[in-house]
Amino acid sequence: MNRVVVITGASRGLGLELARKFIKAGDKVFGISRTRKHWAAARRSVGSKNFELSCGDMTSEKKVRELLTKIARRARRIDILVNNAGYCGPLARIEKIFPAELMEHLKQNLLSAFLMCKYAIPLMVKQDRALILNVSSMAGTRAVPRLFPYSAAKSGVLALSQSVAKENDGTGLRCLTVCPGGMNTEMRRELFGAEDAAKQQTPEFVAGVVEQIVDNKIEVLSGGHIVIRHGKITGIFPPPAA
C-alpha cells in the first residue's frame, strides 16, 4: 500500500508482528527500539529492506524530535504511528512500590507515547489521512493487583489518545487505542513465568486485529478503544462524550 509507518518497540513482540504485517502489505516501516539486542533476529524475521530500525530513548525529548525529523525528511510523510513501546517492572503491592519505580513506568509507557505524539502530530495533521495507534493494555482499562504502576501508566495512554482525537477532530488525523489482554511475550514470561505466558493470546493474533482496524474492516472511532483478550475482541468502545 506504500504507506509510511513508524512503530516503537518494533524489534520484538507485538511491535515486530505489526512490522511484518505492514511490510507484507507493501508499506515502509521505520522501527524504533531502546536497544539493538533483538535487531538481528527482527531483521531475519521480516526479511525486507523496507524495514529500517533505529535505536533511541523514547523518554528523551531531544532524541524523539531528532528521530521523527529524520524520518520525515527521508519519507516526506508519516501515515501511521504506532506507539507500542512498553515497560513493566516487578509485581508488588502498593506499599512496597518505590516512587522511582512508578516514575519509570510513567516515563517508559506514557511519556514516550506523549513525546511521539507531540512531535508527530504537526507532521501528520497536514495530511488528508493519518492514523495514530496507541497501544495501552486491558490493565489500562481497569486496575490489576500488584501492577499499579503499569495500570496507571497505561490508563494515561488511553487519556492521551482521547485528547489527541478531540484536539484534531475535523482533520484527517485519527487517534485510537488498542488494549490487549495478556500476550505470550518475553515481558509476560518475565512477570508470570513461561507456563502462564504459553496460555495467553499470541502477538500475531493481536497484530491481525490491528491490521483489520487499519484496513477499516473493524471500525474503532477516533478517541475510542478496543479490548482484545483470550484471542477475542471483547469490546469496542466509542470515545467519551464531549
Image (cartoon, grey):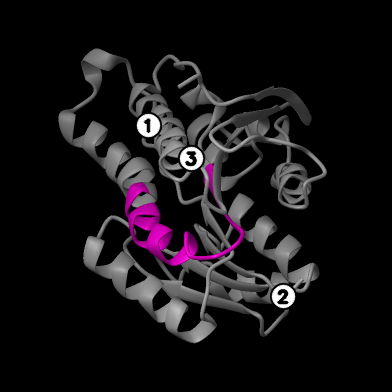
Q: CA distance from mark 1 to mark 2?
A: 32 Å
Residue 81 vs residue 66: left or right?
right
Residues marked 3 and 1 touching at CB (< 8 Å): no
Dot 1 or dot 2: first in sequence order is 2
Give the residue drawn at x 73%, y 35%.
Answer: 201
Q: Residue 102 at x, y = what percent?
A: 25, 32
Splitting the image into 4 quarters, where does residue 118 fall? bottom left
Give the residue drawn at x 64%, y 35%.
Answer: 221
Q: Nearer the viewer, mark 3 or mark 2?
A: 3
Identify the mark at residue 143; answer none if there is no mark.
none
The C terminus appears in which quarter of the rendering? Answer: top left
Q: CA distance from mark 3 to mark 1?
A: 14 Å
The N terminus appears in which quarter of the rendering? Answer: bottom right
Q: Secondary structure at mark 3?
A: helix
Q: Residues within 10 Å of mark 3 (few under 14, many from 20)?
A: many
Q: Residue furthest left?
A: 99
Residue that mark 2 sits on:
2
Q: CA distance from mark 3 to mark 2?
A: 25 Å
Residue that mark 1 sits on:
156
Residue that mark 3 sits on:
165
Residue 43 vs residue 113: left or right?
right
Establish if 229 lies above or below 13: above
Dot 3 or dot 2: first in sequence order is 2
Which residue is at the front of the view, 199 or 104? 104
Establish if 176 lies above or below 49: above
Give the residue type that dot 1 points to.
Gly
Residues marked 3 and 2 touching at CB (< 8 Å): no
Give the residue type that dot 2 points to.
Asn
In magenta stretch: residue 98:
no
Dot 3 or dot 1: first in sequence order is 1
Span of residues in magenta: 114-134
